[in-house]
Each structure stands twice: as C-alpha cells, then as structure tokens.
Amino acid sequence: GGQNQFHSMPYRFALMVAQIAALAAEKPPMSTFIVGGWQPVAPSEVTKMMAPMFQDYLNEAVGKQYDPPMNFVFQPMDMDLSSSSRVRIMQDKLHMLYGVPGHIACKAAEFSWVPFATPRVIIGTSTAGCDALVIFSLLNNTAIRKIEDLKCKKLGCGYLYSGTTYLHGNQQMLEHGLHIFRDMAQVRFYGPDYESLHQAVMRGDLDGGFATSSWITKTHLRDMDAFRIHDRQDAAMFEDEVYPSPVSRLTPTYGVIISSKISWQLKAKILDALEALNASHPAMKLMKFAGWRSSVNFEISYKAAELAGVAYKTGDGKIMCRDPYNRMDIWMSIKCPSDHYKVDYNETLLQCARAGVPCPAGVVCFCKPCVMKPQNIFLWEVVVALCGALYGVGLFYLLLRP
C-alpha cells in the first residue's frame, strides 16, 4: 500500500503536467473572432483608436492561449451601410460589438446578444462608470435661460443611436413638454460629427444642442465656461459616487455586447483580459479609459430608443432597429404626437427652405415635420348644422309673417 502511495505522487504530478499541456494546446473555438466598434470620428481614426485594444491586445492576452492561436480582428462598424452591424451579424461575420448605449441596447434586443462589458471613462482628472447628457446653449444668449426657451429655435443633435447626443436629449425635452419635431424651428442631425455640432452652437448658428459630457471634457473643456447647461446637476450621483462635471442627465456610457453563440469559457477569457487593463496601458490611453467591468444595464437606453422610434416592434412582435445611416432612416424613426401627422418624406426636403432656415451641407435637417391634423368634421355634424340653420330660418320667417 505504501509503495502504491509513493508511486501515486509522480503519477499525480504527471497528470497535472498533462492537464497543463492539454490546456496550453487547447484548440480555438473559432479561427477568427471579429470585433466591431463605433466612435464619432472617421473610420480610419476608429481603427487607430480601437484596434490596439480589441485586436492587438486581445490577440496577445487571449488569442495565444490557443493552439493554433485564435485571431482577433477589429473592424469599424456602422459608419455607413457597407459596414452595417445588422448585416454582419446576420452573416455571422461579427462576434462582439462596441458602441453607444442606444445602439448596442437595440442590437442586443434585436439579435438576443448579451450585454458584456463597460469601460470606466476618464472625465477630466477623474473617472466615472457612466456618461452624461449635456443640453447646452451659450451663456451670453439671454433669450434662452431654460429648456422651454428652446421652443421655435434651432437645435443640434448628433448620432441617431447616441444616448447623449439624441435619445436621452429627446426624452428630456419631452419631459418638458417639447416635441422636437413639432416645436423646434429646425432640428439638425450631425451624425458622428460632434465637432461641427459643437462649433455651430459656439458661433451662434445653432441656439442649443445635445452633447456628451465625456467628449466635451476630452476635446473642449475650456468651452464649458461659455455654456448654459439646462437642468443642470452639479453633483449627480452614480453608484454612490459623484459624477465629476455638471450634467443635464446621467446616462450609460459606451459598452460591449457579445453574441450569445460564444461559449462562456471564451467570454470569461475575454472579460478577464479586459478587466486586467488599467489606465497606464497604451491601448487604454488611446481610448481614455481607466478600466473595464462587467456590463451595466442598458435598459434605460433601450427605452429611450423605443420612445424616439429608433427601436420598434413589427406586427409579429419582433424587435427591430432603424438603420442610422441616412436621412430616410431618421425620417422613418420620427414619431409625431397623436394629434399630429408626419409629412411625406419628399415634403420634408422642402420645408426648411420654405421656412427660410437653411441647412448646412452634409447635415440632415428637419423643420417641423410633425403637423397638426386637420379637424375631422363628420357627416352627422354637417346634417345637424344644416337642420339647425333651416330651423332658424323657418322660425325667423314665421316670426316675420303678418
């Protein structure tokens, strides 16, 4: 018995070595893992910003755990129709997607993907686990002191799926009784060109706009002294910590969703790799991230997308997401109040010119596409009115008879 026990020690050691060798030689679950991502910059810049993390780093930290190594490839996504994440998902050519909360919340609902990871972002000299909407106008524009004063003014929005530059801004305006497609003189969509939106407000070409707090602090921190931030909160709280700059509303930040087809083992490896990063890593510096965590809930961004008509249900109850690429997509998403109707798409092309409100080149503009419905006059109302009129005439005639 003692001899067997003695021989069991090297056996166990050999077994452990074999297990480690088997783990080291683990075959990859797929040869290529494709990660898509969106940022409000040109596609080439998106790759420069994001490939070091989602391609180079993941190849080192996760890909090399397999034999042969699994290849992580980053691709800019949803910059135009040719890079549609919907098409890539349907073709099984996309496995993980990074983007704005409205977009990933809608795509997760449409394709049953899983919210996966959320970055902790650097805001000035601090960090936060969320982002924030800023509804702003210029401080020296004394005609606009509160959100309601934006009625009949020109408003700038960003990307159709952005929580901060559109969805939650639209939601907040509705809470103040303003429907932007009914009440604004003009609504402009700048898409991912947040810089042009910002500059249009700064020079007075727009009366107000929706902005992303983290983007402003990265690019135009000094300009915030010139802003009037509407519904301003100076110490907004998220998960027991104070957000480091003034906001109109806290929102989820960018995040990552992942295909439900990916095994939990691979998901765990990727999440462990992301959570191992800190602000000192070169890839994190490019993105201005302080760290990663498992995903927060994007449900409020989905609700905002649904409210805006960007997410909708088909007749059979299937969730769908509007495409964010052109004017027609935005027009299709517009939901007018119940007592208004949406004017024909071709008519919207002429509205701004007729109103004398020009639209800058490369920007999508709408000038009150929600129009009051004409009052319905029913036949019975006409008959009653005629009978009343005839009765009045007859009575008058009888009174005048000698």
Image: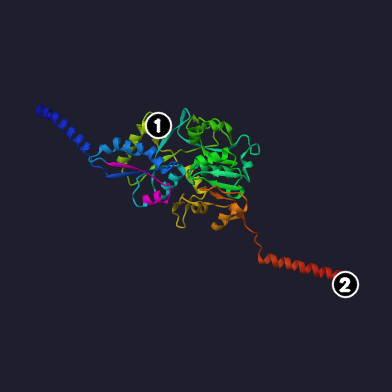
Coordinates of residue 373 in the picture (x, y in percent):
62, 57
Name which residue lies at 54% across and 57% down.
345
Establish if 244 lies above or below 187. above
Q: Which marked residue is nearer to the observer: mark 1 or mark 2? A: 1
Foreground residue, 302 or 184?
A: 184
* In this rendering, position of residue 226 left or right of residue 80: right
Q: Nearer the viewer, residue 394 or 364?
A: 364
Q: Residues in magenta?
A: 70-89
Secondary structure under the numbered disc 2 in the rendered image: loop
Q: Residue furthest front?
A: 361
Magenta residue check for 86: yes
Q: Amino acid at mark 1?
A: Lys
Seen in the image, is 282 located left or right of residue 162? Answer: left
Q: Position of residue 316 (x, y in %)?
A: 45, 57
Residue 151 versus residue 121 in the image, above or below: below
| Dot placed on the residue nearer the N-terminal end, 1 or 2 | 1
Tell me, yes or no, if residue 354 can be seen here. Answer: yes
Pick the residue in front: 252 or 369: 369
Q: Which residue is mark 2?
A: 401
Residue 5 sits in quarter: top left
Q: Residue at x 64, y 41 (%)?
A: 149
Q: Is residue 37 above or below residue 319?
A: above
Which residue is under mark 1?
285
Residue pictured at 66% horizontal, 39% vertical? 143
Q: Are marks 1 and 2 in contact (CB under 8 Å)?
A: no
| Amino acid type, residue under disc 2 in the picture | Arg
